[in-house]
Amino acid sequence: MVRTALTPWERSRGEHFGALIRRARGDRSMVDVAAAAGVSAETLRKIETGRAPTPAFFTVAALATTLGLSLDELARAAALAAGDDVAEGDGAGVARSA
């Protein structure tokens, strides 16, 4: 099966998403966060650097839960940072869930 090439917007969204995850990780080690989320450190590294711009939903959900992030706000912030005019909010940061 041949994978369809990503659009420039999709690549940009993936890079911004990775940067959001990296900022949310803060001082926690990549290995600790990856282990807590049940993903490999290599997968987390690829997401954070934008080399995996379209991670699986369950990977995103596990990382969001581990980092205390809202999936809605995370998706909105990544889309806004990539230049999506449709999303609402200011995209200034990622809201943490209570």
Image: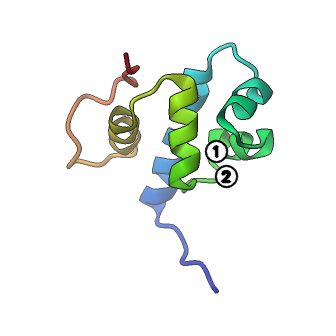
Sort mark 2 into few (<14), some (14-19) or many (20+) by Cα contacts within 10 Å. Answer: some
Q: Residue at x 50, y 40 (%)?
A: 16
Mark 2 or 1: in front is 1
Q: Position of residue 44 (x, y in %)?
A: 70, 40
Q: What scheme was used to colour the molecule? A: rainbow
Q: CA distance from mark 2 to mark 1?
A: 6 Å
- Callout 2: helix, strand or loop? loop
Q: Nearer the viewer, residue 83 or 25?
A: 25
Q: Quadrant of residue 21?
A: top right
Which residue is tagged 1? 47
Which residue is tagged 2? 51
Q: Residue at x 36, y 22 (%)?
A: 95
Relative placement, left or right, of 97 versus 30 is left
Q: Which quarter of the rendering shows the N terminus?
A: bottom right
* Residue 96 badge: none
Q: Position of residue 25 (x, y in %)?
A: 62, 22
| In the depicted structure, whether residue 51 falls above or below residue 18 | below
Can residue 18 be spotted in the picture?
no
| In the depicted structure, whether residue 52 falls above or below residue 62 | below
Relative placement, left or right, of 90 versus 64 is left
The amino acid type of the residue labelled 2 equals Arg
Can residue 47 be spotted in the picture?
yes
Q: Are marks 2 and 1 in contact (CB under 8 Å)?
A: yes
- Callout 1: helix, strand or loop? helix
Q: Residue at x 57, y 39 (%)?
A: 62
The amino acid type of the residue labelled 1 equals Ile
Q: Position of residue 8 (x, y in %)?
A: 47, 61
Q: Which quarter of the rendering shows the C terminus?
A: top left
| In the depicted structure, whether residue 36 falls above or below residue 18 | above
Relative placement, left or right, of 88 versus 17 is left
